[in-house]
Image (tube, rainbow, N blue to C red):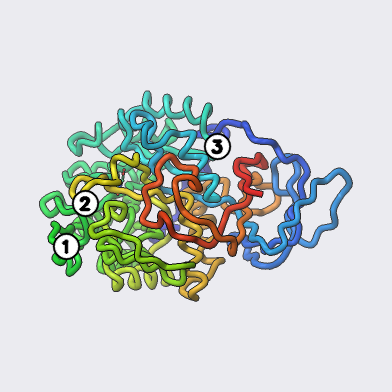
Amino acid sequence: MLGGSAVSRTPLDREAVFFCATRGALMRNVLLRRGRVIDPGSGIDSVMDVRIVDGVIAAVGTLAPEPLEQVIDVDGLVVAPGLIDVHVHLREPGQEWKETIGTGTAAAAAGGFTTVFCMPNTDPSLDSVVALEELKRRTHRDALVIVHPIATISEGRQGERPTDYEALAAAGAVGFSDDGDTTQDSGVMRAALEASSRLELPIIVHCEDSALTGGVMHEGDVSERLGVRGLPPIAEEIVIGRDLALAALTRGWLHVCHVSTGTGADLIAAAKRQGVRVTAEIMPHHLTMTDEWVGGCRRLENAVEPQGLGMPADPETKVNPPLRTGADSRHLLSALKHRDIDLLATDHAPHARTEKQGRSLQNAAFGLTGSELALPTLLVLVRSGSLELSDVVNWLTAIPARLWRLPAGTLQPGTPADVVVFDPEETWRVGPHTLVSRGANTPLAGMTMRGRVKLTLVGGDERHRDW
Ligand code: DOR
């Protein structure tokens, strides 16, 4: 249910739309034994066994091994539905030096994700049926996890002419976004949200008023200290306000990307209370890192060996929307816990080494690699008592599955065996050699994180193993 009205679209058929290549070793008869099974969709959080037969969840409970069954001891590990990331940048076509469908989905699998929604700021952008068909061809060939495309709101992401929403929806788009940029023209946004109300697909918005942009980090004390131009919170909040008003007018489904300010979260909460059909996402980096990181002070709450590694104005911290203040992070955490913000996503935004390192803050690209770091980063908040692990899993599985009516996000018997097994305690050092993604652009580089994905299955097919 969104804003009080039921979503009537038929569930997404994973065979009919975007799927992935079958290339792993199909685990036919497997028993995952004695793991902590967390399946928020079924209300399960206890030590149990999970049986997989022919790529499908066959049973969850206390189960005795059967003849010819492969038994995997997962004692001490967490077993959960494969995670769903509604916001990644796969960069293909057109920016393969940053990432490809192959490397981006391998990184997703290494981070425990079995379904991703890819953003359309590719080259060419995903603004036509032809572009979606080409993407489908490539995902069938190269993708290691299920990929659903987000198509653009405007032709070429130029913000001037709406795309053919009906045709793009029929070709498999799960939403529309000009992410990376804001659709400044309110008329185009109105048309998009009107189409959204017909199609029951979200308009996914990157909120930034173009008259107030040009900065490279959060506008505040730290930007002043560093002497660099800031991105004011109000640039984000003005557009959130406009888009909420347009969603109220049109009854379209608005999905606000990467909310980074406390006031932005409050605006969304107030609109929800008034029945506006709005959902919103927060990124792990906005919950755990602040603008102080840009100046070189990196303190990840409770991380192993918190370090002050950075140099002043570190380009690895440059992301849009920017890392905000500690007060914003705390406010966002509270909004998430109060269900004012619906879910978590990564905004995995890989860039080449040369687009970040050795550059000034001014010249570096915006974006952080996120797929493999989301879970370890969120586990920091779990260990500090700020979040419950079952809630984290819920925000990354059952909730996105329910909103988009995906046949995923649960371990219920009879559903495809999309499964992640992770060790919440294993430590590892973040760096280009330990990340699967082609992009190693993260302010966590060099830090030791706790929490490692051990096994990722898509439809029972092994897509990542670290055993
Ligand atoms: O930091 C960002 N990077 N924010 C965006 O909205 C786009 C993304 C990218 O595509 O690199």
Residue under label 1: 226
For the residues labelled 1 and 3, the Cα–Cα distance comes to 42 Å
Q: Compared with residue 77, is residue 170 higher up or lower down, i.e. above or below? A: above
Q: Nearer the viewer, mark 1 or mark 3?
A: 1
Residue under label 2: 361
For the residues labelled 2 and 3, the Cα–Cα distance comes to 34 Å
Looking at the image, do the residues carrying marks 2 and 3 touch, with CB atoms under 8 Å apart? no
Amino acid of disc 3: Leu
Q: In this view of the protein, which residue sits in the foreground, 52 or 99?
A: 99
262 relative position to 141: left or right? left
Work out whether mark 2 precedes mark 1 in sequence or the reverse, and give the earlier one: 1
Considering every residue shown, the one lying at the far left of the view is: 211
428 relative position to 212: left or right? right
59 relative position to 184: left or right? right
Which SS class for mark 3? loop
Q: In this view of the protein, which residue sits in the foreground, 112 or 278?
A: 112
Q: Residue at x 24, y 60 (%)?
A: 312
> Dot 1 surroundings within 10 Å: few (below 14), some, or many (20 or more)?
few
Looking at the image, do the residues carrying marks 2 and 1 touch, with CB atoms under 8 Å apart? yes
Work out whether mark 2 precedes mark 3 in sequence or the reverse, and give the earlier one: 3
Amino acid of disc 2: Leu
> Dot 3 surroundings within 10 Å: few (below 14), some, or many (20 or more)?
many
